[in-house]
Image: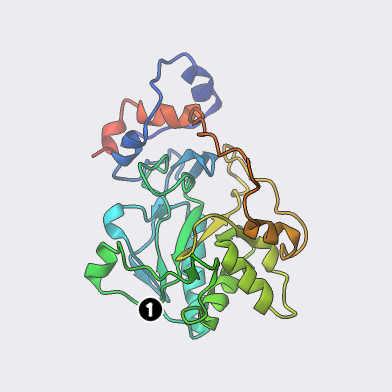
Amino acid sequence: MNKILLTTSFILSAFWVFCVQATPQDWQRVKRPIPSEDGKAKPIGSYSNGCIIGAQPLPYKGDGYQVIRLNKNRYYGHPNMISYLQRLGQRAKAAGLPTMLVGDIAMPGGGRFLTGHASHQMGLDADIWLRMGSMSDSEALNSDGKGLLVVNRQTRRVDDSIWNANHAKLIKLAAEDSEVTRIFVNPAIKLKLCETAGADRAWLHKIRPWFGHDSHFHVRLKCPVDATYCEEQAPVPAGDGCGAELYSWFEPAKPGAPSGKPKTVPPEPFLCQQILNSPNRSEWLE
């Protein structure tokens, strides 16, 4: 099988090859992981603008976890992410928690999504649902509408009739792993964790408030040490993040504040464009 060779000479010569900017539809057409010449997975670019060579699928079921939304074909990740999720499932099971439900990781080649995500592009992001407990095979295949909303969107606070200690325990277990750099949750969930964490607060700085994320949390791993083309994100600020930074999320918008401007989508990393234009791309396209 022909495989992509990531070498300096390839990178330099690539700039002389005409290449059309890839679209989300192009990445959607990638149905199988893109093979790596040396057998090592290679995340390329950034969490919100990248792709991955050598992704691995997360087995549908394992110790303490189950993959859902299987019809989306988004259960591929860097081997570090696959190992992390399996490790977390085992820890969750050992802690007596119900089965952990793993949502989207990345598409087989990573890249941009048509819908649902701005990040998750190089196999180092994963969504874990706040609904807990195993699903039937049919539910796991198509899980739309089956999530558990734990935030009251009117009061912008956690719904205490739904939230329970298992949710906090799972997020804490997820954050304690050294591979994790951030976990994105709804600001109301971060507030609840700040209020209930007690004296053990060393993990709270990784919990970052962000829009949405009220029925799942989003785990992000650091770039692997040997990932030459992976762009690491800036470190999270010091402290537990439970002060003014958090409370600013609950402040009303200032009168006359400008609305957000549409974001300009940056060009993809050139290596990602080259993957989709590779002469042997039929190996991984539908």
Residue name at image x 47 percent, y 73 percent: 89
**Element on which disc 1 rests:** loop
**Which residue, as the protein is rendered here, is positioned at the far bottom?**
96
Query: Quadrant location of the N terminus?
Result: top left
Residue name at image x 41 percent, y 76 percent: 132
Q: Is residue 180 at least partly visible in the picture?
A: no
Q: In this view, does 175 lie above or below 33?
A: below
- Amino acid type shown at disc 1: Gly
**Looking at the rendering, which quadrant does residue 144 occupy?**
bottom left
Residue name at image x 35 percent, y 63 percent: 59
Viewer-closest of 62 and 138: 138
Residue 20 image offset from top left, x and y in percent: 38, 21
Query: Quadrant location of the C terminus?
Result: top left
Report the side of 114 relative to 42 (left or right). Answer: left
Residue 100 image offset from top left, x and y in percent: 43, 73
Q: How crowded is mark 1: few (under 14 residues within 10 Å), some or many (20 or more)?
A: few
**Which residue, as the protein is rendered here, is positioned at the far right?**
238
Report the side of 202 relative to 79 (left or right). Answer: right
Q: Is residue 52 at least partly visible in the picture?
A: yes
Q: In this view, does 110 lie above or below 159?
A: above
Viewer-closest of 265 and 110: 265
State how many labels appear: 1
Q: Mark 1 points at which residue?
A: 133
Viewer-closest of 179 and 74: 74
Residue 114 image offset from top left, x and y in percent: 35, 41
